[in-house]
Amino acid sequence: MVTSPEPVRRGGGEFVRGAGLLVRGFGWWRRRTGLMLLGLLPAAIVSVALGAALLALAANLPSLTTWLTPFADGWPGVWTVLLRVALGAAVFGAVLAVTAVTFTALTLVVGEPFYDRIWRAVESADGATVPEAAPGFWRSVGDATDLIVRGAGVGMLAFLIGLVPAVGGVAATVVGVVLTGRLLADELASRALAARGLDRRSRRALLRTRSARTLGFGVATQLCFLVPLGAVLTMPAAVVGATLLAQEVAASGAAEPQVSRPPSGDR
């Protein structure tokens, strides 16, 4: 039997450790304040634009739900209200899921020079050599587009779940946070992993080897993004935490021993 050089914690311990990476990212506000402040600018620009869109949606949500449900005009008043409130919550929840991934994708592209400096500073913090296989601008744009498309899929799923009577709102919130968190972790860690020469498929396969840790980091990040102004303040820390995540999964992947296959006659 082949064993890993270091034991891998599973389940809740790994999830908490992943969330702890974001906490360590916030620690860089004290360690490198000036560098982290640079990361606020692109996050603030994108946040203002997306925030304005969300406010416009919220203001027009009653009219939108009425337009989507003309068949309910003749229903008893309470049932019409319940239907339209549930639909409005499902629509807004789905849009929030899409907004989170869109914010991350656009902010990373707009702030590429700033976040490049942050993750390189994390890589070199302990005197290590910084990986130099930079992904390039257009590859970053491609990754961002892929993230938005997958985020739209999560939003549609959250919308459909939100339509389920009674439990739909809670279930849609949980599913949206979990799936969106996973997407955020994937995208945020992509720069540091791509710099190690890994393509998109290899990066995702490596993150799956530490799935609970990756999910813990992503869910913690997503929850911070849902707090007013949280996305702006969290984004630089999330870049730091994602770089630490990339370091850990890359190191554990390199440490995995090769499994020797028995001779064909050995059954």
Image (spheres, rainbow, N blue to C red):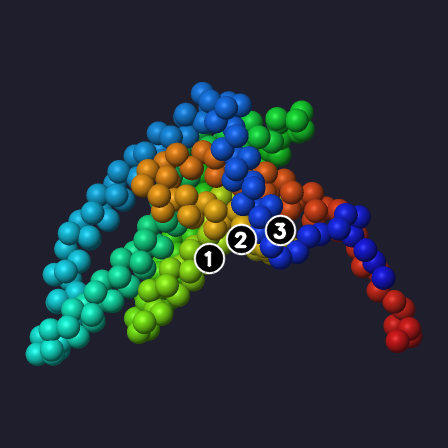
Q: Quadrant of residue 44?
A: top left
Q: Considering the image in quadrants, where does the N terminus appear?
A: bottom right
Q: Earlier in the sequence, mark 2 or mark 3?
A: 3
The numbered mark at residue 178 is 1
Q: CA distance from mark 1 to mark 2?
A: 7 Å
Residue 111, located in which quarter of the rendered image?
A: top left
Residue 185 against residue 166 in the figure, above or below: above
Q: Which residue is mark 2?
A: 215
153 left or right of 139 in image: left
Q: Secondary structure at mark 1?
A: helix
Residue 260, placed above or below residue 113: below
Residue on which disc 3 sits: 14
Residue 187 image offset from top left, x and y in percent: 48, 47
Percent across and percent down for residue 193 are 58, 43
Q: Do labels 1 and 2 touch, CB within 8 Å?
A: yes
Instruction: Provide residue 238's location: percent of width, then percent of height.
Output: 48, 39
Q: What kind of residue is marked 1?
A: Val
Q: Amino acid at mark 3?
A: Glu
Residue occupying the far left of the picture? 74
